[in-house]
Image (cartoon, grey):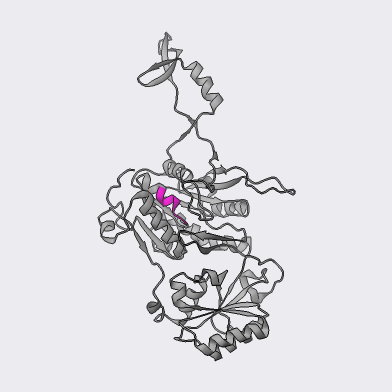
Amino acid sequence: MRTQAGKPSALLDTRAIFCGDNLDQLRKMPDACIDLVYIDPPFNSNRVYELLWGDTKEKRSFEDRHASTKAYIDFMRPRCEEIARILKKTGSFYYHCDWHASHYIKVMLDQIFGENQFQNEIVWSYGPKATQSASYFQRKHDVIFFYSKSSDYTFNALLQEYSEGSLQERETRYKHEDEQGAYRLTTRRDADGNKYRAKVYLKSGVAMTDVWDIGVINSTSHERLGYPTQKPLSLLERIIKASSNENEIVLDAFCGCGTALVAAQQLGRQWIGIDVSPTACRVMAKRLRDVCALPEDEKLWRVGRGFVVRDLPWTAAQLRKIPPFEFENWAVIALGGIPNKAQVGDMGIDGRIYPVSAMPAASGKRAGELDFMDTWYPIQVKQKDKVGRPDVDMFEAAMIRENRAKGFIVSFEFTSDALREIDAFFRREHRIIIALTVQEIVDETIAMKLA
């Protein structure tokens, strides 16, 4: 592993993971400050990933859902515009996507970067999945769009290994060998037209194409962390080697379990990671400590020998002091829900959770961006010491009005009367209310209640 030099930019904190909305963090960055950006954002696929995470085997959910292609592009456009702004003139951008919206993404990126700055559509051929389909050809690849900021961009040509047959053919032709390797003799002419014998050495590989055969992370891989969309380290190493040099800055704005950060660290680059998931941020921090032997330490980070994690969720004491609307948004997002656009006149519902079983069934303006999903659970948030029976009664009325079978209510504590009414409501109406405390959310011990 290479040792990185000192901090390359006085304007940026590198070797740092930021927890939160990447749009906020991108907007804080100065113009033309990043050498390479790779993103692997949630695909427009209406998927929710559920898995057992880490040593505690706690159930986690990673949402990967957008209401429509338009909503997905509307979500990604301002982020890609900020990425274009912060890229250096010599910088490059890699956008990892799949078939769900790749054609729309390409049009968007052409508009932002310019059609002339499109360099490659890289096909990551990862091999067929285990499932079969009788109605379409089996899918076995993702797409990575490669754009540059200008025509003067960093690119280090890479070689890939010869195929077995091609290598055997070359070895039969390159019969000679010296200290520089295997070579063959060929006849050439000098400036005067005289013939002479010249050595042509066997290259270590063939020029790399835009089709990359790299296997996925499977259940037996030593890399496997259990993160649902984890990408192979070799995939990110290839991108980073091709489009950056040592000590240059690599940014992953949807960094998940941190594969790009690990690759950048091992290749001697500076790096910045951003992810909205506190769980993902903690997992990637552990990975950097374990795999890269990089200490998570503020003092060491200041002298270029460690890394830091910024903006992890607040403590319960801090959450008591923030404005009510901000508290509502925090609670809804922490549960994996969607906050209301308008925070007044919400009729007792502060947000919605869309479960795995959500399917298109209804439409209407009241549902907002997710109006095609009729299956959802209401969330009520109360920034008070204890939720009492009257609060529960109001939430029950909202659930009955919206004909919801399940709902969530969040507060710092609940009175015994409130909990008894929640139990009675289930026996009376066969509707479930899940009571969650702020401390349970902060401690991330709510997984079983969300299942």
Above or below, comparing residue 6 to residue 281 in the picture: above
Q: Residue at x 42, y 11 (%)?
A: 197
Residue 159 relative to residue 338: left or right? left
Q: Residue 434 lies in magenta, yes or no?
A: no
Q: In x, y percent, where is residue 390?
A: 55, 91
Q: In x, y percent, where is residue 18?
A: 40, 62
Q: In x, y percent, where is residue 129?
A: 62, 47
* Res. 120 visible in picture: yes
Above or below, comparing residue 340 to residue 247 in the picture: below
Q: Looking at the image, which is closer to me, 335 or 96?
A: 335
Quadrant for the C terminus, please.
bottom right
Q: How many marks?
A: 0
Quadrant for the N terminus, please.
top left
Above or below, comparing residue 126 to residue 434 in the picture: above
The image quarter in which residue 287 lies:
bottom left
The image quarter in which residue 141 lies:
top right
Q: Residue 258 lies in magenta, yes or no?
A: yes
Q: In x, y percent, where is residue 143?
A: 57, 47
Q: Looking at the image, which is closer to me, 409 or 430?
A: 430
Stretch of the chain drawn in magenta: 256-262
Q: Residue at x 71, y 49 (%)?
A: 133
Residue 168 relative to residue 298: left or right? right
The image quarter in which residue 354 lies:
bottom right
* Res. 32 visible in picture: no
Q: Residue at x 48, y 53 (%)?
A: 225
